[in-house]
Image: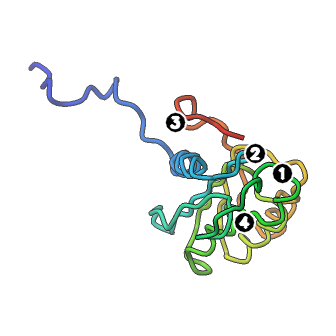
């Protein structure tokens, strides 16, 4: 019996990407929306059925137009920036997000907030040495895992 040419060859079929890989790829794409020329961070939240609740990125409050020269001085504008995790958590209620993926490890405050929102799994790409996220995750029993290799990462631009 000959093989049907309309059916995929299972030996040639790509594997289905994992949920963490899927989430990281979406977070990466969300980061491309950030207007911050110094650091673009993206985030995504998935519910308990692995459906997307929302995507977010770091930037200024919605509807705020930065004055001329605002982006020139990184240190002067940092206190006005909303982290991707803050923007993301504004899109869901406590307990509704099971997975959050972020292109950078959450800072200490954002990790605390994600724990307060009862997020069970947090994935990130870039390490953030100043964060205490790993200790916070351990205390609250939250899975915190770095994922640096996920589909299409080499095909998409990474802007820091």
| Residue that protrudes farthest toward the left in the picture | 1
Q: Earlier in the sequence, mark 4 or mark 2?
A: 2
Q: Circle 1 — which element? A: helix
Please identify, in this view, whether the residue under mark 4 or under mark 3 is nearer the observer: 4
Q: Earlier in the sequence, mark 1 or mark 2?
A: 2
User: Pointers 3 and 1 in contact (CB under 8 A)?
Assistant: no
Which residue corresponds to mark 4? 82
Viewport quadrant of the N terminus: top left
Residue under the image location 84 percent in, 65 percent down:
79
Whole-Å distance between the Cαs marked 2 and 3? 25 Å
Which residue corresponds to mark 2? 38
User: Pointers 1 and 2 in contact (CB under 8 A)?
Assistant: yes
**How many numbered tags mark residues here?**
4
| Residue 53: x %, y % from top left | 49, 67
Q: Residues within 10 Å of mark 2 (few under 14, many from 20)?
A: few
Which residue corresponds to mark 1? 74
Q: Which mark is residue 151?
A: 3
């Amino acid at each position: 019996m000959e093989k049907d040419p309309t059916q995929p060859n299972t030996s040639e079929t790509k594997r289905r990407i994992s949920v963490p890989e899927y989430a990281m790829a979406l977070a990466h794409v969300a980061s491309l929306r950030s207007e911050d020329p110094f650091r673009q961070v993206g985030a995504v939240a998935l519910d308990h059925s692995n459906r997307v609740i929302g995507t977010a990125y770091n930037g200024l409050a919605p509807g705020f137009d930065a004055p001329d020269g605002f982006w020139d001085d990184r240190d002067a504008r940092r206190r006005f920036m909303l982290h991707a995790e803050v923007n993301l958590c504004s899109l869901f209620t406590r307990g509704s997000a099971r997975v959050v993926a972020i292109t950078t490890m959450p800072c200490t405050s954002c990790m605390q907030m994600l724990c307060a929102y009862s997020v069970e799994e947090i994935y990130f790409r870039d390490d953030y040495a100043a964060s205490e996220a790993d200790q916070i995750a351990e205390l609250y029993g939250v899975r915190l895992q770095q994922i640096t290799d996920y589909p299409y990462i080499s095909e998409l631009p990474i802007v820091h």
